[in-house]
Image (spheres, coloured by chain):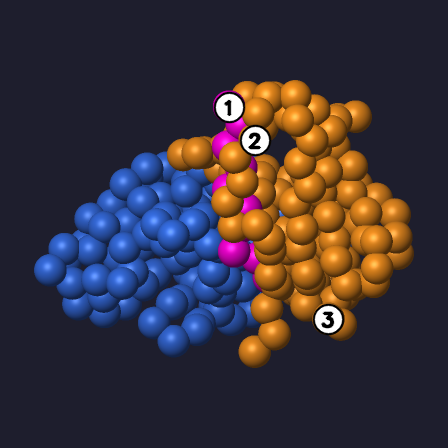
């Protein structure tokens, strides 16, 4: 079974509008972390935002926010006021807690390709 | 701001040849990782490394792969006899502590092409 599911292979958004990229996850660990990374066409992986399983508040970082719904096991990324430079692949990733013996490797989804239209 | 660096940025090699991919993690980081991303696919974990030994490895990380930290700053991934299916982007990542909220910072990647 997929641990991280990103159901949108591609998304389009108009410049200056907001967009939500979906991510659902599957874990039985009570302790885990959720991450979003951006991968532009140049290939590097850029960390955007982190949400811990025990965090009470949704994470925010500038124009990025994470809509964390723990009961539904979803961690959607919201990008407000989209810019042309936001066009990239976006990956959701999870790091499971210690009680699985994990040393913290990330498990990635398949990604969503976001295209921002002028 | 400190960053993870990787060399080379691109490497082309013949099938069966050995390649060594190099990474310099952020200087005070203690945990190191290698991931790979086959073109158009998701990022996959290969191996994690702490205290000069492998902590965990995936099923991808078979006997053809090895890692070492030869001099306290570099962290290398060696592929002994490359196969066509080893063509991928290889990312190194590091964290300071093994805690859930620690963010893994990725290097820019090495794009390996096996012919």
Give how far across and how far down residue B49 sits, in percent.
79, 50
Q: Main secondary structure of the magenta part?
A: strand
- The chain containing the residue under callout 3 comes to B
Q: Identify the colour of chain A in the image.
A: blue
Q: Which residue is mark 3?
A: B27
What's the distance in space between the residues labelled 2 and 3, CA to CA? Answer: 30 Å
> Residue at coordinates 59% horizontally, 68% vertically from top-left?
B3
Circle 1 residue = B115
How far across and down, in percent of the image, does residue B41 sit?
45, 34
Circle 3 Cα neighbour tier, 10 Å, few/some/many (<14 / 14–19 / ≥20) = some
Task: For chain B, give the colour.
Answer: orange
Numbered disc in front, either 3 or 1? 1
Which range is magenta?
B105-115
In screen coordinates, is A98 left or right of A113? Answer: right
B51 vs A22, left or right, is right
For the residue labelled by badge 2, is the local secondary structure a helix, a strand or a loop? strand
Question: Does residue B108 appear anywhere in the picture?
Answer: yes
Mark 1 crowdedness (10 Å alpha carbons): few <14, some 14-19, many ≥20: some
Q: Residue at x 74, y 67 (%)?
A: B29
Residue sitting nearer the eye, B97 or A25: B97
Residue B13 is marked as 2
């Amino acid at each position: 079974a997929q641990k991280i599911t990103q159901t949108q292979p591609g998304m389009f958004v108009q410049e200056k509008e907001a967009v939500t990229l979906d991510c659902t996850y599957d874990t039985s660990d009570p302790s885990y972390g959720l991450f979003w990374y951006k991968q532009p066409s140049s290939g590097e992986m850029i960390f955007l935002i982190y949400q811990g399983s025990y965090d009470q508040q949704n994470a925010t970082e500038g124009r990025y926010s994470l809509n964390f719904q723990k009961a539904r096991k979803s961690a959607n990324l919201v990008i407000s006021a989209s810019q042309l430079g936001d066009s990239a692949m976006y990956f959701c990733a999870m790091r499971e807690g210690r009680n699985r013996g994990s040393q913290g490797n990330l498990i990635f989804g398949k990604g969503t390709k976001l295209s921002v239209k002028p | 701001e400190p960053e993870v660096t990787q060399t080379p940025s691109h490497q082309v090699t013949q099938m069966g040849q050995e390649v060594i991919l190099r990474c310099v993690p952020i200087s005070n980081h203690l945990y190191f990782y290698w991931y790979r991303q086959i073109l158009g696919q998701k990022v996959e974990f290969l191996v994690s490394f702490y205290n000069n030994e492998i902590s965990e490895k995936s099923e991808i990380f078979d006997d053809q792969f090895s890692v070492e930290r030869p001099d306290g700053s570099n962290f290398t991934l060696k592929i002994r006899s490359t196969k066509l299916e080893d063509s991928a982007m290889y990312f190194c990542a590091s964290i300071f502590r093994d805690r859930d909220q620690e963010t893994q910072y990725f290097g820019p990647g090495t794009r390996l092409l096996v012919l």
